[in-house]
Image (cartoon, rainbow, N blue to C red):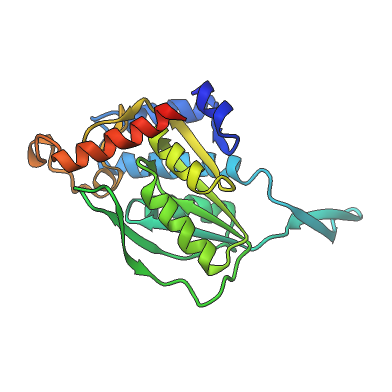
Amino acid sequence: MADLTARYGNLHVSNHPLVAHKLTLLRDNGTAPKQFRELVRELSWLIGYEAMSDLTTRPRSIETPLEPMEGAELEPRVGLVPVLRAGLGMVDAMLELMPTAQVWHIGLYRDERTLKPVEYYNKLPDAATVQVCLILDPMLATGGSSAATVDILKAWGAARIKQVSLIAAPEGIATLSEAHPDVDIHVCAVDRNLNERGYIMPGLGDAGDRQFGTFAGPGSEPGHASDETAEVVRRLQRTLADD
């Protein structure tokens, strides 16, 4: 991980002990959907707090019960962009931190053969209404969906964009950083690599399925990746090794 943070100056990995503790519980295969959702919310609060540490403020004059004083208020308008559906579990925690934040949804799904993102839902207004956008997606795996979301937000007119995730793979960090080096990436942990099916290892499984109780177990999934999927993962890993 040290090599990645040295290579990519936009990568920020939390070293908070509470994050490590809660992330272990989140990963545990025995964690039920209710507790999983609660942990996603708690971790989102913690990593969101860190991700917003550099937002600018402006002076605000107020009166305490004892005397007037000069305080501060958040300056930029902030937008939350959860990537459907897994990103929905991160929204409530972020709204607790910033109750005035706008929430805009972008729907992308990953083609299971090519691992490429496919957009199916986008309700952004015609022009940007915020200065800072936080992309919320628990898993930064191949990085394709995140890079595509950034493309959409930049075309929309967003001035500053941050990626906020719980777990990232090195391949996804490389993909997003090389496509958009100006986008800060805030994560709770960086895992070892992607497997041949594009899952983060050791990871936590499918974040959407585990939040919403739709995971039927390993027996319900194909036992092997298609040759096309495996080749996409190998190509990402070769690119990372070459850098």
Q: Residue at x 43, y 42 (%)?
A: 175
Q: Left or right: 31 with respect to 149?
A: left
Q: Left or right: 136 with respect to 84?
A: right
Q: Position of residue 25 (x, y in %)?
A: 35, 29
Q: Is residue 38 above or below residue 234?
A: below
Q: Residue at x 29, y 28 (%)?
A: 28
Kindly indicate the quadrant of the structure image that contains residue 184. top right
Q: Left or right: 91 with respect to 74?
A: left
Q: Residue furthest front?
A: 242
Kindly indicate the quadrant of the structure image that contains residue 106. bottom left
Q: Position of residue 15 (x, y in %)?
A: 55, 26
Q: How many marks?
A: 0
Is there any visible trace of residue 121 in the rendered image? yes
Is there any visible trace of residue 197 in the rendered image? no
Q: Is residue 217 above or below residue 150?
A: above
Q: Position of residue 34 (x, y in %)?
A: 29, 44
Q: Residue at x 39, y 35 (%)?
A: 171
Closer-to-camera residue (173/207): 173
Q: Residue furthest top?
A: 2
Q: Residue at x 40, y 39 (%)?
A: 172
Kindly indicate the quadrant of the structure image that contains residue 241. top left
Q: Position of residue 57 (x, y in %)?
A: 76, 54
Q: Left or right: 161 with respect to 145?
A: right
Q: Residue furthest bottom?
A: 126
